Every structure is written in structure tokens, then in C-alpha cells.
Image (spheres, grey):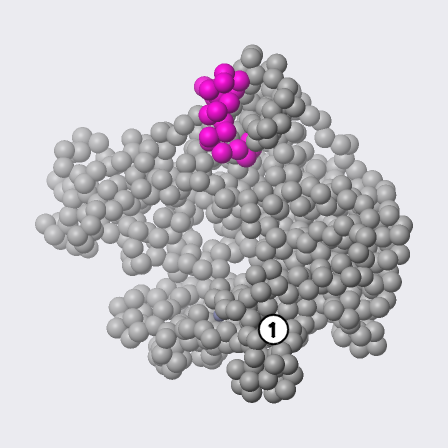
Amino acid sequence: MSQPILCVAVPTPLYRRFDYLPPAGAAHTTPQPGQRVRVPFGRRSVIGVLLEVVTHSDIEQRKLKRAQAVLDTEPVIGADILAMVSWASRYYQYPVGEAFAAALPGLLRQGQSPEATPRVHWRLTAAGQSVDPATLARAPRQAAVIAALHVHTDGLARAALDAPAAVLHALADKGWIEPLTQAPLPAGAGTGTVRGHALNPAQQAAVDCMRERLDTYQPWLLEGVTGSGKTEVYLTLIEEVLAQQRQTLLLVPEIGLTPQLVSRFQRRFPVPLAVLHSGLSDRERLSAWQQARTGLAPIVIGTRSAVFTPLARPGLLIVDEEHDVSLKQQDGFRYSARDLAVWRARYLDIPVLLGSATPSLESLFNVEQQRYRRLALPERTGVAQLPDYELIDVRHAPLEQGLSAPLRRRIRDHLDADGQVLLFLNRRGFAPTLMCYDCDWVAECRRCDARMTWHHSDNRLHCHHCGSQRPVDTACPACHGRDLHPMGQGTERVEQALAEYYPDVERLRIDRDTTRRKGALGALLERARHGRRQLLLGTQMLAKGHHFPNVTLVGILDADHGLFSTEFRASERMAQLIVQVAGRAGRHDRPGQVLIQTAHPDHPLLQLLVTHGYPAFARAALEERRAARLPPVTHLALLRAEATEADAPVRFLEGVQARISAAAVAGVEAWGPVPATMERRAGRYRAQLLLQSDRRGSLQQLLGDLVRQLEQDRASRQVRWSVDVDPADTY
Ligand SMILES: [Zn+2]
Ligand SMILES: [Zn+2]
């Protein structure tokens, strides 16, 4: 009798899977799919994932190598993740072994056991309960842990405590805290959970609709205006799912995963939360993953890659801010976490809830096609009102350091009335470029087709595309003149202007430069939440999901970027950002006002947005897409190539184009190749070829064949190439 053959996903950039014989001496047990296996690969030994056990290989049995060991006694990857990652590797045209590597915590890729994680819950000991955190003034991090555990008497997960291991161990050594040998069990609904607010009628209707169908696959789009209480709907549904002893996985954009969100969940549900985000150590990531997998954590919250987290008793998937571009991975394994969540929910036959104040046109189109069902929260909770919009025509109100006179006056009025003002500018640094007034030279990156941004804090020029920097030029390299000036505004420069105009007012700047340090964002947001008579200035970090109850005026300093971009999604993004930023205003008892500076106040989409709101904008934008045969009405894939030699990428893509013509797959069109909008980045030249089709299946068939041909082709080794299916950006 022939031996079973193990089909293994091996972490390598090759697209296919690899066949092995079972390890010697393992004849009595058949390995199971989802277990990790150590296999010889070339001259190395690597850890792969067993995909399938079959009886036949295309390779002769005597040529097959033997696997070295099966690492797990049971599958570490469940059937749903196994199926989803296998499907995603085909759909997104990414090597299956590397797709699985992306889906597994690093320590598991290195062969560690998922069980060998340390205890991760801590609670106060009897001695600790009598410690007053105020007596620990000289050890603020220890004091914070003690204070948190005083509130959460059942204990808290390591991740929720946000303290380094050394701090916890110091407290344990003093006998004040102890690790929990057994994490608290999931509490049923109502038992021990803090009751939420009473739901308003729209929230209640949304909950009731979903409650009817909690035991079956159904994608829901929860379209709730900013401040309408989407999170309260999530919490109520989670409570329901918890009562059924099932788990919820909540995906949020990276920026949305603030300590406030986690503590809100922690307050509501005194059960272990598994929290997964990019800031975790390998050890923390594995233990959160394991808590989800064993069911110890009934609620799992995470950013994009958390969609791969195994769940012992899956009950509900939620994707918050489903329109957010950060849910789509932009390099390597270019998956959409939102779309995978929907796929996984269908496989598991459970509901999936997509929430947003500004849904993607994709999801709205799916509602139109009756694939998703829509739930609406049209009103803000409590007494809060939606803000009023007003456009400032900067052709007639010239900007001084980025601020027009009408905006400056209005800022003063709101500050005088004890209001908080939020200013939005999606450009960090001091000035987006440095210019010579004598000869019009501008400072450009030497490695990219892009301008350098002047940063005041270190007085250097930074390239935001490749990260290179250099000192600010003191003389013009072209004409040797000394008349060099910053052009345009970044957040640093506007902050300086605000200091001149409003010297007596506290300013908080929130962008990537002011939040690099761990905990800095949380601290700034905390100050912003309680601020009155305060100026907040920031990039899109400030726009999303945060609740600033005292903001009465929002100023959008430059709305025009999205109106005339070559990127077809730019206007959708602009509208989403404007609505999200505007949504920070008037969230409490005071009405909010939104001022938008633009040189194109008559632009039809902008007009529609400010007079009739996002739904009207979205309908018009969707009609434009339909007319232009662009997604979501059709499907796109982008082939990108880059090389150090200038002509190589276009030449390579011309060859690809020829193959596509030869394949003549009906209904697929190829556009290009063309050089990328920024042709040179980080010293490499880039080009792209766009594929478009009315039918996803045709596009998939073509891509699958193409990728396998390119893998074999010598010419494809002259360039770096990649495939982006459903690209978020087409430049
Ligand atoms: Zn010059
Ligand atoms: Zn650069």
C-alpha cells in the first residue's frame, strides 16, 4: 500500500505547495491538516503548514523527501483559517507558504509550542489590595498597574495593563500582584457586566434585526453618522453573543485601536480580552492568539492581521471603520481584512457586521446588489446635532501660513466662547518643500521623483517616500543664491502660526512626528478629550473615531487634494476624511461648525457632500464609477514592476501585455504599461499594467495562469514584480 503524501505550504516565494512523505516512524498516526511540519527544503530545514493528506503525488514516490517531524499533536490552524488562507493565496496571487507565514504568530513560525506561553492575567493579592497607589509616586508605572487592578478586581490581561514585564515582576516580587492560574470565565449576559446606555430607537432596531439572524451567515452594513453610537450597537450584540458562550472578533484600523477603546470594552465586559496590534512583542502576540484559539478570551480585538486569529467558538465578526484603507495590506500579501472577514463569516456560517459613518462604495454597492443588508443610524445620540458645513473660497480669502482670515476670526470666536477647535491638515512636517526664489529650484529627493519635506524639529529635509534625509540647503545648488524659502504648509508650520495668532491658548499637535514614542498618542488624546479653549491640530490620526466632547469648530485647511487626483478613489477618500474630521465637532451638547478651505467651492462632489451629506455624495460617486466602468462595478488588478534600470519595468510589462493578448481571455482588458505616477522611488524605477474585467472569475483565471508563467520566466528575474488584486491605490 502506498504511503500517505503530505502537501505542505512551505515559506518560500514559490507559488506551489510541496509534497513530502510522513516522517519516519510516524506510520501509526496520520498527520492532520493544520499541523506544523518540519521539512527539508533545499539545504535548509523549514517549518511549514500541512494543507492536506493525499494518496497521490505528481512526483514519483521514490523521489519524495521525508518530512522530519510533525510539531503539533493537534492542528494549530483550524479548518476555517486553513481554507481562508489557501483561498486568499489564490485570490490575491500570493505564494501559499508565505501567506500562511503571514497568518501565524512569529513564535509559531519558529517552531515554538502555542501552549508554552506564560500566564498573562494578573490580579491583586490580599496584600496588594491594601496598597494605595498614591504611595507609589516615585514608581508611576507600578502605581498605574495597582490602580488599574483596584478597578478590575477579577484581574486584567497583560496587554490591557500596558506595563513592561519588569514592572509586573517587581510588583509580584513585593507580593502585591499575582498571575492568575485560571483566567476568569466568560460572564454571561447581565452577570457582572456593566450595563450599557439604553439604546435609542435606531440602535434598538439595528440590534433587533441582527438578533433574529445571529446563527447564520449574513453580512450587515451598519451605516451610522458620526456620533450615532455604533459602538453601543457592537457592545449590545457582543453581549448577546457572549451569552451564547460564543466569541466575537472585532477588527479596527490601526489608528482606531486606542487604549480608550480597549478600556471601554474592558469596563463593559469583565472577561479576558485578547488584543492584537502591531505594537506587541512576539510573546504577547502568541499569548493573545492562544487565548483566542482556546476560547479563554471571548472577545478578540485587533488590527488587520487579526482576521487570521483562530477562534474556538466563533459567533460574530465585526469590522469597524470598514471603509478604512488600512484594512488592506499594501505590500507583500495584499489582502483586504474586511473582505476576508466576510469570506470567513460565510465559511463559518455566522454574521459579519461592517460599520462606518462613511461606507466604502464597495459595501454600498453590495447593499445595492442585495448581498449585504443595510442598517442605518441616521441620528446622533443624546442631544448632539450634526455639524453645519461652510466653504471658504481661498481664491478670495488668501491664506496666511495656511489660514484664511475668515477661518482665523472664527477660531478666535470659538476660543472666546470657551470652545475647543480642531484643525485638520493631512501633511506633516514644516513645509512640503524648499524653493529658491531666484531660479525656482525646489529641493527634491535624490532617490525619488518627489519633493523633500522640511522638518523644523531637526532642521532637516525628509523624503516621506523613501525615508532619506539631509541637512537643509543654505545656498541654492542650482544658482548658488541664498534666497531659499519654505513653500506651503505642514502641521509644524501651522502650529507655529497658531502660536503667533493665539499665543495664550494651549495647542496640541497630533501627527506621526509627535506620537512616535510609545504611549504618546494616548497621552495627547487624553489631554484633548478634557481640553476646553484649546487648539488641536493634526493629520488623519486625529480624524478617526476619537471622541472629543468639547470641539465646537473644525477647520479643514486644504480640501482640494482629493478633487483632481489621478487616483480614481481620491474623491471618495477626501469625502470620507472630511466627514470623519467634521464628525469630531459638536458631539456633545454644543452644536458644531465645520469650515472647509478650498479653491474649488463649486466642485459638484464637494457641493453634494456639504449640502446633502455623505449618502448623496456616495450615490453620485457610484454613478460616476458605473459610467467609467471602475470598481466596485468592475474588478481591477494591478501588475507592478520595479528595477534599478530605467527601462526594465516597462519592457517587462510589455512582455506581460503580450502574454495577456496571446491568452485572449474574454472580458479582460489590459491598460498600459505606463510608468508609475512617481516613477522613481528609493532609487528604483517603477511601472504598472492595469487589468480590468466585468467578471471576477475571468480576471482570476488570467492572473492564475500568468503568475505561474512569470514564475518560470527568466525575464521576470530582472525586475521585482507583484500583483495587487482589488488595489486600494492605482498609482
Ligand atoms: Zn536658485
Ligand atoms: Zn525619497
* Cβ at disc 1 under 8 Å from ligand 2: no
Residue at 85% in and 52% down: 415
Residue at 38% in and 82% down: 647
**Quick check: 678 left or right of 210?**
left
What amino acid type is highlighted by mark number 1? Thr
The span shown in magenta is 160-184
Task: Work out whether 193 lies above or below 289.
Answer: above
**Measured from the top left, where is residue 217 in percent x and y?**
55, 42
- In the picture as drawn, the residue positioned furthest to the top comes out as 126
Task: Work out whether 532 lies above or below 138.
Answer: below
Residue behind mark 1: 433
Residue 117 in view of the camera: yes
Residue at 37% in and 75% down: 644
**Quick check: 179 left or right of 523?**
left
**Measured from the top left, where is residue 315 in percent x and y?**
54, 35
Q: Does the magenta portion include 50? A: no
Q: Could you say which is closer to the camera, residue 488 or residue 650? A: 488
Residue 318 in view of the camera: no
